Amino acid sequence: MKRNRNKLLKLLPMAALTLAMSCNENEFLDEVNPNTITTETFWESQKQFESALVTVYGATQFQSISGELLQHEMILGDIAGTESWYRPFAFRNLTYTDASIYVVDKWNELYVGIYRANQVIQNLADADPSVFQEGAKESIEAQAKFLRAFFYFQLAHTYGGAVIRTDVPTGLDDLEGAFSSIEKVTNTMIIPDLEYAQANLPQVWDGKDLGRITWGAATSLLGKVYLYQEDWTQAASLFKTVIDSGIYSLTEDPMDNIRHDTEFNSESIFEVAYNADVNPGAPGGAVDDNQFETGAEASGMARAIGQLNFGAFNTLLPTYYLHELFINDEVDPDNPINDGNQQSKRMFASIAPLNGEGLYYGLEYGEKGGWAFGQSAYVKKHTNWYHLPNEDGLSRSGINFRHIRLADVYLMYAEAILNSGGSVDEAIDYIDLIRSRAGVKTLRQYLADNGNTFPQLHVSIQVHGAQPMVAPTRENVMTHLKRVERPIELCFEGHRWKDLVRWGMVQEVFTELRADEVWREANKEAIFDQFPLRIVERVRPDFFLCSDNYDPAVHNYFPIPAQELQTNEGL
């Protein structure tokens, strides 16, 4: 029972904790300090509800939800590897357990967010309407419900379901509950919350409110929910509503979606704010303000995955598969976005090969070492390579995390219409909008130049010598979307493992990429130190263990954390 009690104390509001801890067990006072804020006196004004809502937003900053711990999920699929001495190695090899740090932390942090959202929603129901300005009560509730839906979506598609909690716990028994399926969590919690948010949120926020949840975020996430349910028609309809709203547009440069100084731009639909300047001295891993510490409001992502020689740890490394995808991202010299570059704009923004263009942390590529022991490239996205000489020693980065942006909506819309029997040409059009923005040849250009065929760009030229040319059938365009466009455009943005799982193609991908590794190992003398991939010293075996270890019944979703199994008798 001690573990249950500690768990409840962790969830209780700080005001209540303060009262509980300051009370002498042998002394009970009849007088109550009128200046003390309690749960009974707090929920009395619009300002107080808005303050509580800020804490719900604050939960999105937790490192397992939008920060450095996401690397453990990013490494699960086909785009990222690591080294054996780093913590994500267990996730790369699928040898994590129900007590592994990310498995436990993500569960806990998502439920902290849900608890905070439930506080706001539950107390709004009992609030005096007269204390709110017109529309304010509905707006606060809509934001809280969107965030609760987002937390539940993450739970459902990370753990294969969730324990549904809609009320603020008042006792230990309230923390117990059965584990519900993805379908039940979706239909009971996620869809109703998003529909309320969609109906009660503005299309845009201005000034100091920039970054709050909007109608577009609610509609886009709702579309994603239906996409995951394979309700293609409903998903397509919702995505098209967002596209046709005229609110959003692709940024001119892919770099604008990874910088700290181009945040909440025209492409942004839902992003989590971080700041490297607030509360100097506080480590980036601590983002929550409480009575014991002052949060940094910063992300620890950059120091975790930036290059080792620039004050980081490069715990996440691009796979050879992802590196080759970027190599195959053929630049269109006639596209005005290009200015003499030989590598695509999204390659420039996403990964750092040794022959990368421009400067890297202010230096020529390779000037400080690296690119050895099988490491053909490093991750640029989410790091400060473009404006700092080194990553911050306290893991403080101010780069926001974009959970939903318009390019993702374009690709989800293309997927939905391909699956619903819609126009293949329309799907190609939306794929090509993204390719054109990246400065690379569009599928239309390939079709025009190659007798109405286009190359299967996910096939390794190094291993297979050439890429098959295929017709633009529904199946082939879908394969391109799955194996090329989504991994290359959205790499390291938290989507890849969930995509592979819902498509049922994890084993297929692992087996294929393990075969490529075997070929490289057998032919290493011929391929070592050869550009454009340039592997030296060894072939990094990213898929050696996971290709054998993978069991969809075990690994598609994380296990319920051990601590939850031990303390929740309802499971």
Image: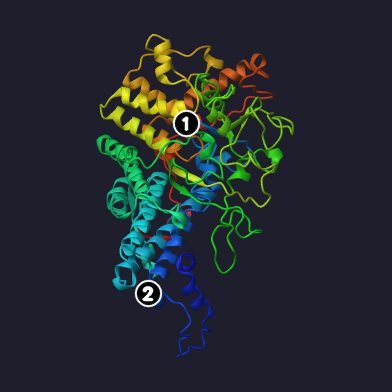
Residue labelled with disc 1? 487
- Picture coordinates of residue 504, whole percent (x, y): 37, 31
Q: Residue at x 55, y 23 (%)?
A: 324
Residue labelled with disc 2? 44
- Picture coordinates of residue 556, whole percent (x, y): 42, 39
Q: Residue at x 56, y 56 (%)?
A: 297
Amino acid type at circle 2 is Glu
Specify how the rendered protein is coloured. rainbow
Q: Residues within 10 Å of mark 2 (few under 14, many from 20)?
A: some
- Picture coordinates of residue 542, whole percent (x, y): 56, 30
- Picture coordinates of residue 33, whole percent (x, y): 48, 85
Q: Nearer the viewer, residue 217 or 151?
A: 217
Q: For the residues labelled 2 and 1, say whether their Cβ atoms are less than 8 Å apart.
A: no
Q: Residue at x 37, y 55 (%)?
A: 148
Amino acid type at circle 1 is Pro
Q: Is residue 437 visible?
A: yes
